[in-house]
């Protein structure tokens, strides 16, 4: 377990976390842009506006993380990866909604500042677990998986 915790703070993991964060910024722009266009330009409901932004941003996140953060080029495992990636993001979305709702209950009706502070707090809370989920469950790059790859006999 100590090796695993340490692996989250290795040089490779730090680089991957920076990439996941950068992708998160891009996804935030995609999410907010599409949700606002759907809501205010197309007059969609809140639910469908948020769902559109979330769905497209998660797809963009998956593609960028797969190719750039974790450098996976082959097409194997796409369905499994996609399902697990979306599951992790749905959990992160639910945690974010929960944090915003708790903030609303504690502070009262949220204004623009308190709403965004609650969302930023949620980002901080979910970033490391999301990264670990992406690395270990979606793209299978954990320290244990790396050890298995090294220990696996080859047919050469």
Image: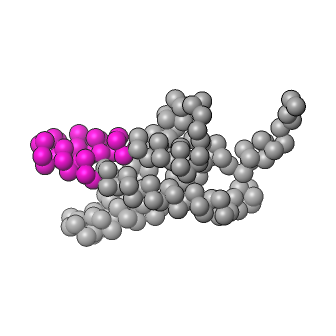
What residue is rendered at 55% in x and 59% in y? 17
What residue is rendered at 86% in x and 29% in y? 155
Q: Is residue 116 above or below residue 49?
A: below
Asked whether residue 46 is in view, the answer is no
Give the x, y percent position of residue 66: 53, 43
For the stretch drawn in magenta, the main secondary structure is helix
Quarter of the image containing the C terminus? top right
Q: Nearer the viewer, residue 14 or 120?
A: 14
Give the x, y percent position of residue 49: 23, 43
Q: Nearer the viewer, residue 18 or 103?
A: 18
Asked whether residue 138 is in view, the answer is yes
Tell me where residue 29 sits by quadrant.
bottom left
In this picture, which residue range is highlighted in magenta? 32-58
- In the shown orientation, is residue 36 left or right of residue 51? left
Q: Is residue 154 magenta?
A: no
Give the x, y percent position of residue 101: 31, 57
Quarter of the image containing the N terminus? bottom right
Q: Is residue 47 magenta?
A: yes
Give the x, y percent position of residue 146: 74, 47
- In the shown orientation, is residue 99 left or right of residue 20? left
């Amino acid at each position: 377990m100590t090796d695993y915790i340490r692996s989250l703070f290795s040089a490779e993991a730090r680089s991957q976390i920076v990439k996941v964060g950068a992708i998160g910024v891009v996804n935030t722009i995609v999410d907010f842009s599409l949700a606002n266009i759907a809501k205010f330009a197309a007059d969609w409901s809140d639910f469908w506006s948020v769902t559109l932004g979330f769905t497209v941003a998660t797809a963009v996140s998956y593609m960028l993380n797969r190719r750039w953060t974790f450098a996976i080029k082959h097409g194997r495992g796409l369905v499994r990866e996609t399902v697990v990636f979306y599951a992790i993001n749905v959990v992160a979305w639910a945690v974010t909604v929960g944090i915003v709702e708790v903030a609303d209950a504690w502070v009262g009706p949220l204004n623009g500042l308190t709403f965004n502070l609650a969302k930023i707090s949620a980002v901080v809370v979910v970033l490391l677990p999301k990264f670990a989920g992406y690395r270990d469950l979606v793209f299978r790059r954990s320290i244990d998986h790396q050890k298995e790859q090294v220990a696996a006999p080859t047919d050469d």
